[in-house]
Amino acid sequence: MTRREFTLTAPAVALAQAKPQRPNFLVILCDQLSLDAIQAHGGKWARTPNIDRLIARGVTFMESHSTNPVCSPARSSLLTGRMPVETGVVSNNLAIRDGMPNFGQWLRDGGYQTVYSGKWHLPEGWAPDNTPGFDVLPVGGQGQGSQMDPLVSAACASWIRSRSKEKPYLLMASLLQPHDICYWCIHPKELVTNHSPVAVDSAMLPELPPNHRSRPKAPAILEKLAYQLFTSDEQWRYYLYAYYRMVEMLDLDVGRLLQAVEMAGELDSTVVIFTSDHGEGGGRHQHVQKWYPYDEAVKVPLVISCPGRIREGYRDTAHLVSTADLVPTLCDYAGIKTPPDICGTSLRPFLEGKPTDGHEFVAAEVRVSGRMIRTSRYKYVRFAGDPVEQLFDMRNDPWEMKNLIDTPGLGAEIRAHRKLLDDFEARMKPAPKPA
């Protein structure tokens, strides 16, 4: 076993155990992971052998999106299958509205043992003892991912190996890395001073993205989100170097969880889902962190694996999916009805290679008043009360460097995307505003 890679070999006697009809679910949720930071997705600057192994034995969605590139709103949507405007969690540190079940509550009522460990943020930072729908594996108080994630993965791994097998389980391991990079944004000068790029060979520093200096025409609220954190390209590159080291920390904890499933003899009876609440700016458009509709923030990894049930080593580049699709997918495999009024649809047909309709577009909310619609070719963005809209040709401009909203000849496309967004919003059932 190497320092960063777990060997996944289980005793033959464990592997011979009978596969239950209803699978277990292990949901691994991380924080602030870019889709293309993963080595198997073409990332060049971090080693991710454990995530790569999961990708090799499952389906990875290359057009996967967060419903809102901010922690609490994204998590409320992932847990309920509803948009943040419906959950009432339109910004951080809010609770899901009363009467709207999360998938822990829903699957517990459907006969599953449901357990949670790690970051919660709805509103408490780490899952409290009274987390709705879940028994909680406590891991202590607040902390950085480098301190807390090993405790979360160790607690979850121990529970997987020692649990009673009377019921199938849903276990959610909510990890924090690579969110620790946010501390570089809070104290950039101190960190650059204390961690000089001189300490690292320049050949090891990641290259800046091609859209690093791109600032396309944008609504006013996005124009304010440029981060002049660093005074040189070298400092930006060192920021990226630190981020990728945090990605490698995450990979180690993912490996610990996967090893536990294998050692329990439940690899082919456990649906493993790996995703993130949002991405990371990574210097694209001179952004860090989240809060915007560009791909660096809104696209997230989504990998689903269960050998024997789900096809292996498949990269889905055709279907537009979002984390709102997880609730109906879990319910589909669990054999229970989905909650009412959800906006996602089951990914099971794609996972099993069966033809199906749908997923021609995805929607996202941004900074409360913003909305995004992504279709197979275009991304359309608008903010309430702002006359500046955005339209990007994602096929020919994947780095989102040119806003085409004023381009002659695209009027029909713009009108079609406006209508698509209007129709989507009309189907939403917004949460009542606080009194």
Image: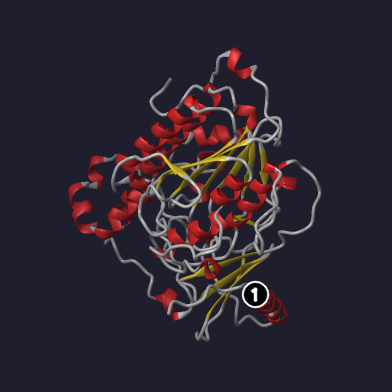
Seen at 51% across and 75% down, the residue is: 370
In front here: 34 or 6?
A: 6
Task: Tell me how many marks there are.
Answer: 1
The reply, left or right, for residue 60 in relation to residue 388 is right
Where is residue 312, by image quadrant? top right
The correct choice, above or below, for 55 with respect to 316 in the image is: above
The reply, left or right, for residue 382 in relation to residue 314 is left
In front here: 50 or 124?
A: 124
Label 1: element kind: helix
Residue 369 location (% of width, % of height):
49, 77
User: Mark 1 highlights which residue?
Assistant: 421
In front here: 348 or 99?
A: 99
The reply, left or right, for residue 209 in relation to residue 61 is left
Residue 319 location (% of width, % of height):
69, 54
Seen at 63% across and 80% down, the residue is: 407
Q: Is residue 85 visible?
A: yes
Seen at 69% across and 49% down, the residue is: 347
Residue 4 location (% of width, % of height):
41, 29
Residue that sits furthest to the right in the current view: 355
Residue 126 location (% of width, % of height):
36, 49
Quadrant in which the C terminus is drawn? bottom left
Kindly identify the amino acid type of the residue bearing the numbered disc 1.
Leu
Label 1 crowd (10 A; few <14 / some 14-19 / many >=20): many
Q: Is residue 70 visible?
A: no
Where is residue 343, by image quadrant? bottom right
Where is residue 230, by image quadrant? bottom left
The correct choice, above or below, for 141 with respect to 372 in the image is: above
